[in-house]
Amino acid sequence: MTATVLDRITLGYRLLWNRHRGLEGIALFLREDPGSTPDSPPVDAAHLVDSLRELWSSDAAPLYLVPQTPQLLFGLLAQVSGTPGPASGEADGPRFQSGPPLRPTLVAPEAFLSGADMRLAVRQAHARGVPLVLLQGDAEAPLDAEIARCFRRRWLSLPPVRAAEALQAGLRMQAAGIPAGADPTPGPLSSDQIYDGIAGRALMEYCLDRRHAFALAGWPSEDVLHSLRHMPMQPEYAVVRATLRALEADRAAEVVERTLMQDAVLTYRFLTYIHSPGLGLRGSVESVYHGLMMLGTNTLTRWLAQQLPRAEEDANLRPIKAQLALRARLMDRLLDAGVEEALRREVLLCGLFSGLGDLLGEPLGDLLHRLPLSSRIHEATVLRTGPYAGTLAMTLALESADTDAIRRLRQEQEMETGEVNRALMRALAGMERS
């Protein structure tokens, strides 16, 4: 295969969640790999944008590009499309004419903006209509007015002191009985910004519900689940209803399977039900699809209807379950099971169930031993061994901005750079804004 720009760059990602607990966007972190020789040419930003465009979807959630080197930021400022116009690349032939230009939001680290050439490039990108976000680090320090007006909003991390102030402000508002959806009142945090590193549920709710933050980068999954540890975890109401609608519309079994597997808890409950003695089915079922074939539409519809009264509507769980569903799809892309459908479905379950123990508050090994699943799933998710372990490790590593750690792991696992990047982009392109 001919080498491309995607063979010379490391990607990582974070999901951006809005105050409705829906997917607002996808942040893609980009770092050039060290050149094979000291005089290796830099990554061509124009080719990079073209390569990303080829793998993206017009239905996907908005893309936020976060270059991690000044050189890459400078190149992207010149190449990212702004105000809609003729599709870039048309003059080069038909190769890129099948899709619209890639118009992501470009995130510029403040530390890269000191030079006059970079500041000029920012102003020129702003003039073309490129949406820009300032990655400002751990402070909301004033910014030079000339450059500040080029940015739609800021991406901020909260130092401990500011996080404590925000948390105390939220508790005071709660004690005063101020509704969470009320218009934001003066406080320690700005509204309509992106906040990073929010590790607690209370601080998350203050940022999104009281300060009307634009989005959070990542999700405080551990603390959200800890706050719900005394409550039995239930399937998500919206996923149960969507699966029922797919059955009512007589959709293909693959569509029903894909819909049901948006929720790891519902998937686990389904496989547990399939193997219950009272159901009387013979043999073991190692995938949702196999279970659907054995169960039949009428029985499945009745079972799903029984789940609705107890189904979960806590919106704070949506990002956690959505991350697991994405993890399953990405692991499938990375391993590339090919035409072996049984193997592919095994890989999907491996990724989906990788966080099941945290969701259900039980040791994952105990949960998996209750089902006659492939031992390879247990080896990878519990023991971190076996044929899927390296792929699962890479899938987890990609959920971060630490591109250096991703590159090291990729080298340890002897994975091809371009193949990892293409798998990641294709998996992310299936994520729609919600």
Image (cartoon, rainbow, N blue to C red):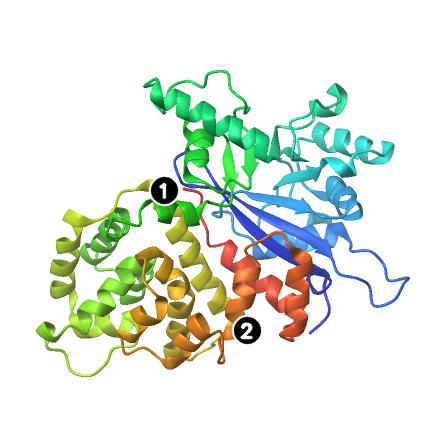
| Residue under the image location 82 percent in, 56 percent down | 42
| Residue under the image location 35 percent in, 80 percent down | 374
Residue sitting nearer the eye, 222 or 411: 222
Q: CA distance from mark 2 to mark 1?
A: 30 Å
Locate residue 99, reporting x and y percent: 57, 50
Locate residue 202, reporting x and y percent: 41, 35
Amino acid carrying mark 2 in the image: Gly
Locate residue 235, reporting x and y percent: 25, 53
Residue sitting nearer the eye, 45 or 329: 329
Left or right of residue 208, residue 51 in this image: right
All told, the count of numbered labels is 2
Q: Quadrant of the C terminus?
A: top left
The residue wearing badge 2 is: 390
How many neighbours does mark 1 have within 10 angstroms: few (below 14), some (14-19), or many (20 or more)?
many
Element at label 1: helix
The answer to which image quadrant residue 84 occupies is: top right
Element at label 2: helix
The answer to which image quadrant residue 278 occupies is: bottom left
Amino acid carrying mark 1 in the image: Asn
| Residue under the image location 46 percent in, 51 percent down | 431
Q: Quadrant of the N terminus?
A: bottom right
The answer to whether residue 256 is seen in the rendering is no
Left or right of residue 331, residue 276 in this image: left
**Which residue occupies the extreme right position in the image?**
39
Determine whether 8 is above or below 339 in the image: above
Determine whether 426 is above or below 290 in the image: above
- Check if mark 2's residue and mark 1's residue have beta carbons within 8 Å: no
How many neighbours does mark 2 have within 10 angstroms: few (below 14), some (14-19), or many (20 or more)?
many
Left or right of residue 264, residue 167 in this image: right
The residue wearing badge 1 is: 316
Q: Earlier in the sequence, mark 2 or mark 1?
A: 1
